[in-house]
Amino acid sequence: MSFLHDLQFGDKMITLMAALVLVLQISMVGQRWLMTNIRIFAIQSFLLAAISCTIAFFNQANHLYVAALLTLILKAFVLPLILGRVVESVGIRQEIEPLINVPLSILISGGLTLVGYVVAQSFYHPEETSTPAALGHNTLAIAIALFLIGFFTTLNRRKALTQVLGLLSMENGLFLAAISLMYGMPLVVELGIFFDVLLAVMVLGILVYRIGETFDSMDVSKLRRLRG
Amino acid sequence: MLLLWLLLVPLAASPLAFFLRRRPTMEVVNLSAFAVVLGLAAGLGSQVLRRGPVSFWGGFLYADALSALIVFLTAFVALVCSIYAVGYFRHDEQNTVFLEKEDVLGEIAGQKLRKYYSLMPLFVFSMLLVALANNLGVLWVAIEGTTLASVFLVTFYGRETSLEAAWKYAIIGGVGLSMALFGTILAYYAAHQIEGIETLAGLNWSVLVGNAARLDKSTMRLAFILILLGYGTKAGIAPMHTWKPDAYSEAPVPVAVMLAAGVLNCALYGLVRFYILTSKCLGPQFASQLLIVFGLLSMGVAVPFVLVQRSFRRLLAYSSIDHCGIMVLALGFGGPLGILGLFLHMTFHAVTKPLLFFCAGNVQQHLNTDLFRKAKGGLIHSMPWTGAAFLMAGLAVTGSPPFSLFQSEFIILRAAFGQGHFVPAILFVAFLVAIFSGFLMHIANLVLGPDPGLPPAEICRWKKYSVLGIASVIIVLGFWIPAPLFKLIQGAADVVAGGR
């Protein structure tokens, strides 16, 4: 089992999983079904948990195991469950209608990924890549790309629930940035953030439910009575 | 120990109100909790003035003069609001405003009140945690907490428009705060690279401020931009201000006051903390320029919307965007005078804004509308006290002498000229004049004029005394600032100046 202690191997594993996360994010932009979107988010969160486990293992950063476990429970199971329940109770399962059409959206996502790489360049120190401290640094570009694509999704989608998914993608990007830059935030802060995310999804879920009830739709472009 | 009690009292008041259910008991719980909090906040202020920064729990909670000032202002606004809220919600209940389809025996009204009285302490709790947290990550968690605690307060009336307002508030706030979190992560990364900072304390303010000069410059630059966008969204700086008029006009008046005079200060507090780090690391120039641009933009955006405004609740929101711009501008002008002007303005604004909202609330409850068009003017005949107070508050909030906001705006203007920012200073004056004229035109049209023949308004004791009480505080503050309060403001300015 010697490869388990080989840092090169760990680095490659992390890069592979991070790349998968990015692919999932772009496929989220590309496809049109709400439930599939929620499932992709669950898989993405599962991969994030795996990445943080790997980083924790190769750097002996034990507090990251806690963050990984919480990500697994919360983001891969609990949140998709809550969101799924909201979709069922509102009774809307139709397609997502983005403001910008799918091919162009994917093109924009590609551009945003490039932006992510450009921004991450300034944090990238190639001379350190062989030391354990630099493990996973090349995932930063992907993290920034996730953040930007999440931001774009939030702006681009009209359905209330998909805006929530966009917000969650942004949060996933931030989590990836934190673990790839410095093995996560201090544990108190990490716990606080998880707590906030859970609460936020519940609050937004209830809000989506009530919007769906009142307007018979989750289309936020119908929310346009307040002007000026 | 004081710090812990400050947080525990509102935290305990929330479930207490939730389980006690009966309206008079919930009112008593809220009032007494916020009265105790105000007492504790005053105690904290005097302790900080006498002995310097206090910390608790191994540095988890930390308070210097800056935090003590924010805590004191938040506690003051919370108490004033809870006094007004008693009268406000009783009036709503009597007039069956809680419109729902099948409200049998006022059960839904009871639930709504219960929601208000149990969420409000949580809202205040998270605001106090913002000011008392030592760790900048916990500060972020607390600011996000203020959003989460207040979303359902914004939807209080359950109208379609209030759902819309709450949705914008939650989503725009959420996106903005993710940017702030990114900025916080980058600041942590900058601290992480310095040898000798242990991982756990890496985000602690008390540790960071000592090492600010050694932080990585390019990282901090990016971090500050993200923080400005993030906490700026929460404070309502243009162009991220769009949630503000909706949330302020749809929320019940006490909640709107907490948003305008409480959350605004807390978000600016987060911005100021990062400003100190950034100006220590990069020199004040970089942050200054950004702040001046955003401050002027906010004031400029507010001008046309104030001039052609149709609803007086939304008018107040644009006034709040304007004042937020003034405070950001003051921070941008910098210098000892600019910073002093910022905290004076923050204090005076937190005292003046509640009166304006209370008067608007009284008028809205009397007329059942918040549109100027339907109000027809001449309110001074049917509600003399509120009308007079409204006119006075309008004069005070637009910064006319002798009211105190004039002094702080004058100090900020002097700071601008002192630092050589001539063009921004001229724009500042121009925007102030435009907003002054627009605001007074609207309020004067509403309050003065011939008697439209409305019946005299019934204003219950609670509403009347909270309006008169805070009006007298404003008049007194125009001529005399209590020495301890001024010392606290100066202390807060010294915290910022010490970071240079």
Image (cartoon, rainbow, N blue to C red):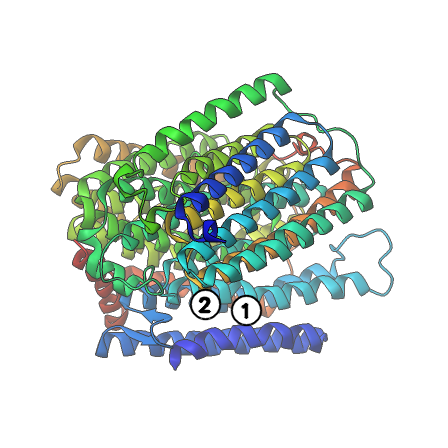
Residue A141, how many percent across, how many down? 42, 35
The mark lying in front, picked from 2 and 1, is 1
Residue A195, how many percent across, how many down? 56, 60
Residue B233 shows in this picture: no
Sequence-wise first label, 2 or 1:
1
Residue, disc 2: B469
Taking depth in this image into account, of A158 and B313 the one nearest to the observer is: A158
Check the picture and name the quadrant holding the N terminus of chain B: bottom left
Residue B189, how many percent across, how many down? 33, 50
Which three-letter amino acid code belongs to the residue tagged 1?
Ile
Q: Given contact means CB atoms under 8 Å apart, are the residues at marks 2 and 1 in contact?
A: yes
- Tell me which residue sits at (72%, 74%) in the image: B21
Of helix, strand and loop, which one carries label 2? Answer: helix
Q: Residue furthest front?
A: A1
Residue A166 shows in this picture: yes
- Tell me which residue sits at (43%, 67%) in the image: B76
Residue, disc 1: B83
Q: CA distance from mark 2 to mark 1?
A: 11 Å
Taking depth in this image into account, of A76 and B358 the one nearest to the observer is: A76
Are there few (<14), some (14-19), or many (20+) residues within 10 Å of tag 1?
A: many
Please state if B259 lies on the left or on the right of B54 as rendered: right
Please state if A216 lies on the left or on the right of B232 as rendered: right
Q: Is residue B456 above or below residue B308?
A: below
Residue B391, how many percent across, how many down? 45, 49
- Tell me which residue sits at (71%, 27%) in the image: A32
> Chain ID for label 1?
B
Which three-letter amino acid code belongs to the residue tagged 2?
Gly
> Chain ID for label 2?
B
